[in-house]
Image (cartoon, rainbow, N blue to C red):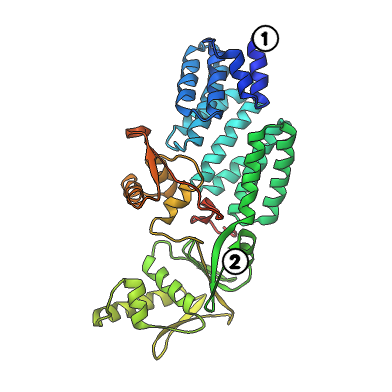
Amino acid sequence: MDSLITAAARALAAGDLLGVLRRVALRNDPAALALRGIAMAQLGDFARAKALLQSAARAFGSKEAVARARCVVAEAEIALVSRDLGWPAKALAAARATLEKHGDQVNAAHARHLEIRRLLLIGRLDEAERALAGLNPAPFPPASRAAYELLIAGIAMRRLRIKLARAALARAARAARQAGIPALIAEVEGASLVLSTPAARLISAGNERLLLLEEVAAVLGSGALVVDACRHVVRSAQATVSLARRPILFALARSLGEAWPGDLSRDALVRRVFRAKHADESHRARLRVEIGRLRAQLRALASVSATAQGFALAPRNGGEVMVLAPPVEDQHAAVIAFLADGESWSSSALALALGASARTAQRALDSLATAGKVQCYGRGRARRWTTAPVPGFTTTLLLPGPLPSD
């Protein structure tokens, strides 16, 4: 490797992107193409960066397996940042294995970081934790240590382990300052803001207020009967019942939870749950059937009793009933929550992250675009969707995911 390439690589490691381009902008050898591609990616020109990295990978000979693997890792990072979650994960795993085989542990660790970040985006926390457990951050340079700690913090926040998240963010901040890379420092600061912005609304006994993530953890650990509208579960200290696939039952549980300690009339339940303007005998008959199903589901947690006017929810342990709801609710709230991270998403990536079909994701995006809540650019497979973050609210932490005890 010649002196200019070496100097450009050191500038890239230090975050000096203009220094990289000054040294290799006019060169077309594989190493220069790769360095230019990575620099362009960090400057935000993902299309140009991807083309440069693919050219570099083709130009490296078959004997330069490590260099080609590094290009694959860089291309995978571009795909992750541009939310192309359909990018072949097997290619990244193969590149990581090549780097490990040839002793390039730092870049192999970076590839592992990318794999874990992808798992976090699509909600596979258990797999992310297992992958992270196999990494030892001790020999990493400061930038890699900061990325490692950000992953720990991301998993901890989604598990609502707030003390662990704060400690990891503090370590990430120290490592980012040691690295001296402004973009990395800003990323850590942005991640820390999640802990100081509202993450949910608490509805209890007719009162409503916003909660920070730490307060959400306190509510879930309080022993109260919690109707969690973020995860579509009902839980207490004794057990957890998921109603994610029973939307009618969950709507009944939430309506009764919001009415606690009082009851809710039959007509009000019909209007809220069945979306009927007027309750007739067929609606009341259906309500009786669904209430019976809800009783069976919540038997271990609460009773659902008939009153003179309607029905009431009462915890078995005699405690409080609390409803946790997202701070902002919308017909397509899950799509908005993903787009609110400020990145550009493809419709296929959104479908993968949501666990929905591509057609369902596209219908939601079209509806939001008509309402002026999202916007797109590009055409065909290159089309990307984006929106400005909702001011003052967390984003993907609001989406359904595993409970802290899972």
In this rendering, position of residue 271 left or right of residue 173: left
Q: Secondary structure at mark 2?
A: helix
Q: Which residue of the protein is positioned furthest toward the bottom in this rendering?
A: 308
In this rendering, position of residue 76 left or right of residue 245: right
Kindly identify the amino acid type of the residue bearing the numbered disc 2.
Leu
Asked if residue 309 is positioned above or below residue 159 in the image, the reply reads below
> Does any portion of residue 381 appear in the rendered image?
yes
Is the residue marked by circle 1 packed among few (<14), some (14-19), or many (20+) residues within 10 Å?
A: few
Kindly identify the amino acid type of the residue bearing the numbered disc 1.
Ser
- For mark 1, what is the residue? 3
- Real-space Cα separation, disc 2 to disc 1, in angstroms: 58 Å
Find residue 139 and report its horizontal and vertical position in percent: 73, 31
Quarter holding the C terminus?
Answer: bottom right
Is tag 2's residue or tag 1's residue first in the polypeptide sequence? 1
Find residue 174 and report its horizontal and vertical position in percent: 74, 40
In this rendering, position of residue 5 left or right of residue 387: right
Q: Nearer the viewer, mark 2 or mark 1?
A: 1
Residue at 42% over, 36% down: 86
Residue at 35% over, 53% down: 371
Residue at 48% over, 84% down: 262
Of the pair 65 and 219, the residue shown nearer to us: 219
- For mark 2, what is the residue? 220
Splitting the image into 4 quarters, where does residue 134 fall? top right
In this rendering, position of residue 384 left or right of residue 340: left
Find residue 316 and report its horizontal and vertical position in percent: 54, 80
Quarter holding the N terminus?
Answer: top right
> Does any portion of residue 296 appear in the rendered image?
no
